[in-house]
Amino acid sequence: MTNAISPLSGVHILVTRPIKPASRTAERLGALGATPYIYPTILIEPPADTGQLKAALSLLQSVYAIIFVSPSAVEMTLKDNVKLPISIKVFAPGRGTAEELNLHGVSNLQIPLKSFDSEGLLELSDLQSELVKGRRILIFRGNGGRELLFDELRKRGAQVEAVTAYRRSIPTTSPAGLLELLKLKKITAVSMMSSSAVKNLVTLIPKQDRKNILFSLPAYASHKRIKDAAEALGFMNVTETAPGDRGLITTLLNYKD
């Protein structure tokens, strides 16, 4: 390692996550000597109509399982000190969502053993047909997104309800500060933890500037699906990491060795 005290010194990385998880990512990167720049390319807001969410939370006693698809789903669902009955099985697709659940006092949860995504969740024994058939499952998620979990659990006979806990939107403020950082070459890498964040980032940069100031930067994607999306948009140097902050930091440390 080039610097035993600050192993990520010289890494100036753009963090594109929503503000709350981005702050935790930035703190962890900063502790290792990196210089993080937080620029959320996704805004997390309450759903336009909160009726569905309130109704779902009022009828938890009859629920077999709850799946939170992201840290934001946890934050927006449990933000008013909502307590989940201990009888409910709780699932998260990865460590970031599990960490957010832990912060809200939920520790009896399951995450995939291999693939940290919907496919991995669907491999877990407690979500197989013989256990979910005829039982009620709630999926707390944002607006839009993949339908794999919903569709497959329905096929297995579960009574599934997809509950919109939040809505994603693209920032409406001027990206002037971001553009200045990119043009002045202050940023040396980009962290990507969702396909939507990558797409929104690209739309914020004028077409004529993307190749020179954005697409040439090393990018770190926390899932193959995100890597594929980034490369399809034009990024030329994308590395897939393990999920979450741990995956990002481990990869950055390896590259610094």
Image (cartoon, grey):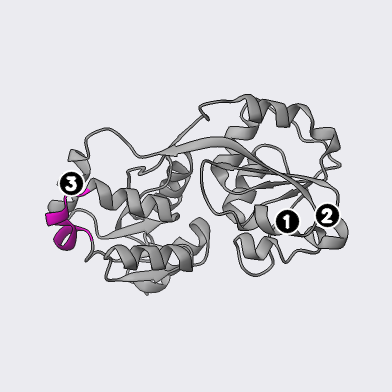
- Report how far apart the C-alphas of labels 3 and 1 lie in the structure: 43 Å
| Residue 143 position (above or below residue 242) | above
Q: Position of residue 188 (x, y in %)?
A: 25, 60
Q: Does 142 sit left or right of 240 as displayed?
A: right
Q: Does 214 sit left or right of 92 as displayed?
A: left
Q: Does 73 sit left or right of 109 as displayed?
A: left
Q: Nearer the viewer, residue 209 or 14?
A: 209
Residue depicted at x 70% and y 62%: 122
Ranked by sequence position, the earlier of labels 1 and 2 is 2
Q: Position of residue 156 (x, y in %)?
A: 78, 59
Q: Report the predominant secondary structure element of the magenta stretch.
A: helix
Whether residues under marks 1 and 2 lie with C-beta atoms below 8 angstroms apart, the answer is yes
On the rendered image, what quadrant is the C terminus found in? bottom left
Residue depicted at x 58% and y 41%: 73
Frontmost of labels 2 and 3 is 2
- Report how far apart the C-alphas of labels 2 and 3 lie in the structure: 49 Å
Residue 32 visible from this viewpoint = no
Q: Which amino acid does the dot numbered 3 rest on? A: Leu
| Residue 5 position (above or below residue 197) | below
Tally the marks. Answer: 3
Return the residue at label 3.
Answer: 179
Label 3 packing within 10 angstroms: few (<14), some (14-19), many (20+): some
Q: Position of residue 202 (x, y in %)?
A: 27, 53
Return the residue at label 2.
Answer: 132
Frontmost of labels 3 and 1 is 1
Return the residue at label 1.
Answer: 153
Q: Secondary structure at mark 1?
A: helix
Residue depicted at x 17% and y 58%: 213
On the rendered image, what quadrant is the N terminus found in? bottom left
Q: Which residues are magenta?
A: 205-214
